Image (cartoon, grey):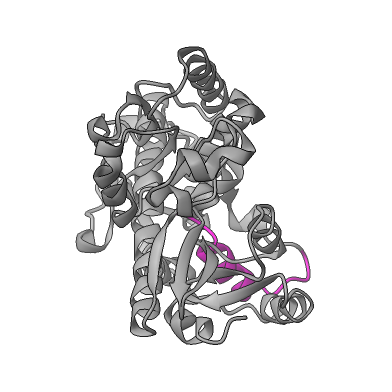
Amino acid sequence: MDARYSLALLGDFPIAIADEIEAAIQERISVLGLELHKDVTLFKGAPRGFRPKHDRCCAALCARIDAKDEAQIERFIDQRVPLVPVASDQDNFATEFPGALGALNGVPMTQGPAILAASLLEASSLIPRQRRVFLSYRRKESTEAALQLYTELCALQYDVFLDTHGILPGEHFQEVLWQRLCDCDVLVYLDTPTYFEGRWTELEFSRASLRKLAMLRVGWPRVEATNIHLISGQVQLEESDLSANGHIQPDAMTKILESIELYRSKSVSIRYRDLVGKLTASVEAAGGKVLGASSRKGLVVSVKNEEIVVYPELRVPTSESFYEASLEEHSPPVAVIYNEEGIEERTWKAHMQWLGDRLHGHARLVKANAAGHRFQDWY
């Protein structure tokens, strides 16, 4: 199976620092059940040698580069590859990055290999809290398998939604259900004989499709796949893959877990580019332009000769989205952009309105399609 994630150390990294970054990456991804150079590739060298697959998560740390590689850096920026400039010291960004990378926020090498590795993993969505899966199933047909899969995914540091575990007593079931679906990267549905006959399961499938989530079908024996044109992939089970108590056998479970990781990576990449595409179209319609991507997948846009830092949020924005957007030293207010499709929970809307009123001068929540209009009168 091809690697799910493509990482890179581009430019003039000292060998000892590069080796320590690699070791830190290997240690961090091992708790996610991933292997370096198998599930995650790490390229080291000049930008022209880095060829990531653009339907997978990818990111690069960039030390000082040769002037002849500037055109390749600009191509990466156009392709929305997250790039994190790494200067020898905090005061040296302007002199070491006179080209396109100079517009992006970066990390000084003096922060050390562990911080540099964490920045690269965060830019490529390889932090545990960023890995979210929604399990869709019919209780009367596949509860045991759903609980088993939930346990396996939690052990690999996924944030997993299962209806019997993810909704607190007293919460509005339907609103919370759709909110959590919008908050995930992958819908894994257990396609049992009557899956599409259930009201909730059919709606979960339809809404995941509208949200453009990756959808992985786990097909039960003798159940014919439908809606093939909407799903990302499938693992078809045979009679021998299920035990008498309804559990999935180890070999089949391994295939399912590997497929979830693959399609999660693709989902994040595709939805990030879709969200940035909406932002770009809106900003360009307002006479502005997107300058590039940087650490934490932040973007720098220019409208009316004013630079605005933007943080795309693929999931449901929260107070943590505002907090993370404010961590770096940018001129406030920064923008958190999101795709509003399917986000309907009334409690969330009231909370974000309350929060936005109090943080207006520091960070603002913006719908991607309306960004150009909002940015014309930003400061």
Q: Which residue lies at the image location 36% right of the left edge and 20% below the top edge?
A: 37
Q: Which residue lies at the image location 58% right of the left edge and 34% below the top edge?
A: 118
**Magenta highlight range:** 169-185
Quadrant of residue 204 within the rendered picture: bottom left
Where's residue 320, x and y in %?
69, 58
Q: How many marks?
A: 0
- Residue 333 sits inside the magenta stretch: no
On screen, 49 above or below 56? above
- Which residue is most to the top? 16
Where's residue 291, x and y in %?
40, 62
On screen, 248 above or below 197? above
- Residue 177 sits inside the magenta stretch: yes
Nearer to the camera, 284 or 51: 284
- Asked if residue 3 lies left or right of residue 363, the reply is left
Residue 355 visible here: yes
- Asked if residue 70 lies left or right of residue 133, the reply is left
Quadrant of residue 319 within the rendered picture: bottom right
- Asked if residue 224 lies left or right of residue 205, the reply is left
On screen, 78 above or below 38? below
- Asked if residue 349 lies left or right of residue 274, the reply is right
Nearer to the camera, 214 or 338: 338
Where's residue 290, x and y in %?
39, 66
Nearer to the camera, 15 or 326: 15
Where's residue 237, x and y in %?
30, 39
Residue 132 visible here: no
Nearer to the camera, 303 or 6: 303
Quadrant of residue 363 within the rendered picture: bottom right
